[in-house]
Image (cartoon, helix red, strand yellow):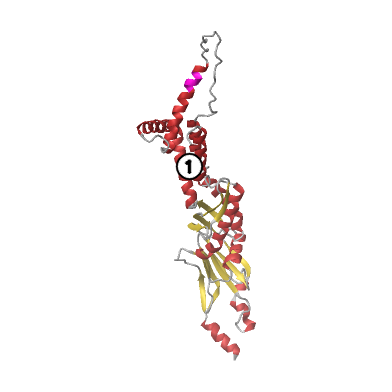
Amino acid sequence: MALMDNFKDWGKAQFLDVVQWMDPSQDMMAWRFDFRGQEIQNGGKLIVRESQAAAFLNEGKFADIFENPDTYTLNTQNLPILATLKGWKFGFESPFKSDIVFVNLKLFNDLGWGTPNPIIMRDPDFGMIRVRAHGIYSIQVPKDKEAIATFIRQLVGTNGTFSVDQCQEQLRKTISSKLADTLAEMKIGVLDVNAQIDEVADAVKQKLTAEFLTYGVSLAKLIVEPFTLPEEVEAMMDKRTSVGMMAPVMGAYTQMQVADSISIAAANEGGVAGLGMGAGLGFGMGGMMAGQMAQAGMGQQQMPMSGGAAMAPQVPAAPAKSLKEELTELKDLFDSQLLSQAEFDAQRANIMKKHGMG
C-alpha cells in the first residue's frame, strides 16, 4: 500500500524540462531552486545566464558548479544523482537529496557603509580624538568555482534566498575594523587625515581585499568620505586658520594697534593706567623711542667740566626687550591658544610692572 501511495505521489510530481533563475529584484545575490513537488526530467535543461552561476549540491555536498553561461543537458550519464528513477527500489522515494543554488555574479555597486561607533585616533596635538567615517563600496562574487563554493558555504548557508542587505551586515563590520587598524598604523594626525583621504582608502582596500575573499566576495571599489571630526576640534581648526591668515600682516596690524593706543592715551585725562593692552603697547612704543634716543647719545663723548675733568659716560640700564616686544610675544602665545586667559592676564601684569607701569 505504501508503494502505491508513493507511486501516486510520484505520478503527481511535475517533471521539469528547464531549470533557470529569472531575478526581477536586482538585489538578490543567491537563490535556492525549490524542488518541492517537482522533479528534474532526465535530459532536462539547465540555463545559466551571463552574470550567473549554478551550484549542484548532493546531500549538502558540492557535486558540481557551472560558472560559465550556457545551456546544460542534465541526464543520468553525467549527473546520476539528479535521476529520480535511480530510487526505483525505494518505491520512487529517492534517498538522494539534491539542491541547486543560483548565484548572482553581477557587480553590486555603490553600497553604503559607515562606522557604527566612533573610531579613536591618537593625535599628537589633541590627544585621543573620536572620529566617524562613511563612504561607499562595490562587491561581487568572482567567476571562480572556489569563490562561489566559499560564498555559499560562508554566507548563503541553507537560506532559500540571500540578499545584498544580508551580506552587508557582515561586511560593514569588517570595513570599520580594518579602517581603525589602518589609521593606527599610518599614524596620521586628525588635522591631516582628510588631506590624505585617498591614501587611507587605498590602504584600507588592500586589507579588505583578502578579508572579503574569505567570504567568497571580491571588493571592486572602496571610497572613504571626509571624516567627521568633533565640534571642538573643528572650532580649534577654525581658530588656527584665522591666526595663519593674520600672520603675513601681523606686523602692520601691531603697528596700527600701537598708533591707535598712543592717540587714545594722549586724549585720556585720567592717564593711561586703565587703557589695557592698547595703552600698554602705546607706552611700549614710547619707551622704545626713548631707549633708541638714549642709545644714540651713548656714542657721544662727554663734554669737559669746568674743572677740566671729563664726565664718565652714563649708560642707561635698558631692559633686554622693550615693552612692545614682550607684550607682542605674549599676545602671539595667547592667539595660538598656548596660554589660558588667566595665564595671559597674570603675565601681562608682570610685564607692565617690570616696565614701571604696574
Nearest the viewer among 2 and 347 is: 347
Q: In which quarter of the view is residue 270 placed? A: top left
Q: Is residue 351 above or below residue 143?
A: above
Which residue type carries mark 1? Answer: Arg
Name above or below for residue 113 compared with residue 312.
Answer: below
Q: Position of residue 295 (x, y in %)?
A: 51, 20
Total labels: the figure holds 1
Against 8, residue 75 (above or below) is above
Residue found at the very far bottom of the displayed protein: 1
The answer to if 293 sits in the magenta stretch is: yes
Q: Residues within 10 Å of mark 1 (few under 14, many from 20)?
A: some
Kindly identify which residue carries mark 1.
240
User: Looking at the image, which residue is at 62% across and 76% down?
Assistant: 96
Residue 142 visible: no
Tag 1's secondary structure?
A: helix
The picture places residue 196, in percent across and down from the top left corner, at: 53, 45
Image vertical order of residue 16 relative to residue 290, above or below? below
Give the magenta part as a residue range.
Answer: 292-296
Name the spot of residue 291 as percent of width and height, x first: 49, 24
Give the quarter of the figure containing the N terminus: bottom right
Majority secondary structure of magenta residues = helix
Q: Nearer the viewer, residue 53 or 314?
A: 314
